[in-house]
Image (cartoon, helix red, strand yellow):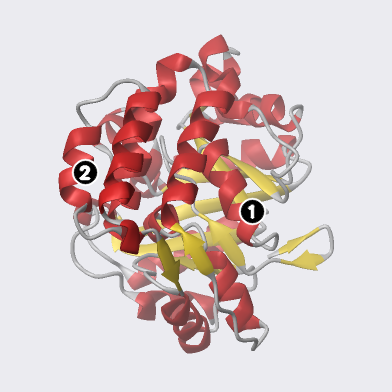
Amino acid sequence: MMINGITHTLHLAPMAELTTPALREVVKKFTGNVVLYSEMLASGAINAKAPHNEPLIKRYDFDTPFCYQLVGNNPAIMANAASVLQDYGCDGININMACSAPHILKTGGGANLLCNFNLAKAVIAACRKNVRGLLTVKMRAGFHDIDLLFLRQFVSMLQDEGVDAVIIHPRAAKWGFTRKAHWDVIEAIVTAVKIPVIGNGDITNAELAMQRLQQTHCDGIMIGRAAVQKPWIFARCQALLQQQSLSLSLDIEEIWIEVLENIQSMLPARLHKSRAHRFCAYYHKNVTFGHTLFSSIRQCSDINDMIVLIKDYFKRNEVERIKIV
């Protein structure tokens, strides 16, 4: 995907309660060549300029390139929310047609837009009029099941309405995160449309990311859950893209605490517990007895108490602190 004349292949997936500035800053410390996204933002709240969204909207110096992700299903509200977000400064607006969370589907947003072709078209048409920068869509490969004919028609419609790139998670919405991601679907769409296609789903390491790029000929890779567990994954991807060797000596404890301290300093206290717990739910998998440690962390509401537990763990398991990848 081209941003300001530069091709960007690597993307950090927008994830509710996970794609915090705390995580984004650490990802950027490992490699600058990754597109960052906000947490999923509700268009109605943005349109109303609800003050509780301010910390989620704030853009930092390291947020470049940067896109906001919007969810909703009202064309006028979505378009106006896109305008509001552009005033904060960004490289693009991403429309969520992928979220399969029940509370999002209930509102008619997220992957539910895949069930209403004309409404999805109206949302894109309205947003395209208001978005000066990039307009992209993140979507599932179907709602109840994967339908390749429908998917081709849907992505072609997005292309015709002026979408600059599409990000495809090749699962049906009703599958959630069960079953495997069908990357052959992405290869089929790459050959069917002219706009860039970015693949997303089940990328667990840099080598697999490169394999998917080569197999499908897609224009980019978006990584979500694996990037929360391994914020350095994009650095590994970038090295492979440039056919360079890269060995990283990682201080697992230091990175963990840095993200938590970032949450403390960058987000209001009301968000500390939820964001810290969500990050730790993935990052704890880097250590042998992480499940037990995370069980203790979940009992904490204060980040300082979580950090005490983490430091105590590494005092007892010093050999796990440094990891070479």
Q: Residue at x 29, y 36 (%)?
A: 309
Disc number lying in front (2 or 1)? 2
Q: Residue at x 49, y 53 (%)?
A: 13
Q: Amino acid at mark 2?
A: Leu
User: Which corner quadrant of the image does residue 62 belong to?
Assistant: top right
Task: Give the residue pinned by disc 2.
Answer: 293
- Closer to the camera in the image, 73 or 308: 308
Q: Residue at x 42, y 21 (%)?
A: 271
Q: Residues within 10 Å of mark 1 (few under 14, many from 20)?
A: many
In whole angstroms, how far apart are the C-alphas of marks 2 and 1? 27 Å
Q: Residue at x 41, y 37 (%)?
A: 16
Q: Position of residue 93 (x, y in %)?
A: 64, 42
Image vertical order of residue 208 relative to residue 284, above or below: below
Task: Give the residue pinned by disc 1.
Answer: 28
Q: Is residue 112 visible?
A: no
Q: Position of residue 310 (x, y in %)?
A: 33, 41
User: Which corner quadrant of the image does residue 257 belong to?
Assistant: top left
SS of the residue at dot 1?
A: helix
- Closer to the camera in the image, 253 or 37: 253
Q: Earlier in the sequence, mark 2 or mark 1?
A: 1
Q: Residues within 10 Å of mark 2 (few under 14, many from 20)?
A: some
Q: Position of residue 100 (x, y in %)?
A: 29, 44
Image vertical order of residue 81 relative to residue 199, above or below: above
- Closer to the camera in the image, 139 or 161: 139
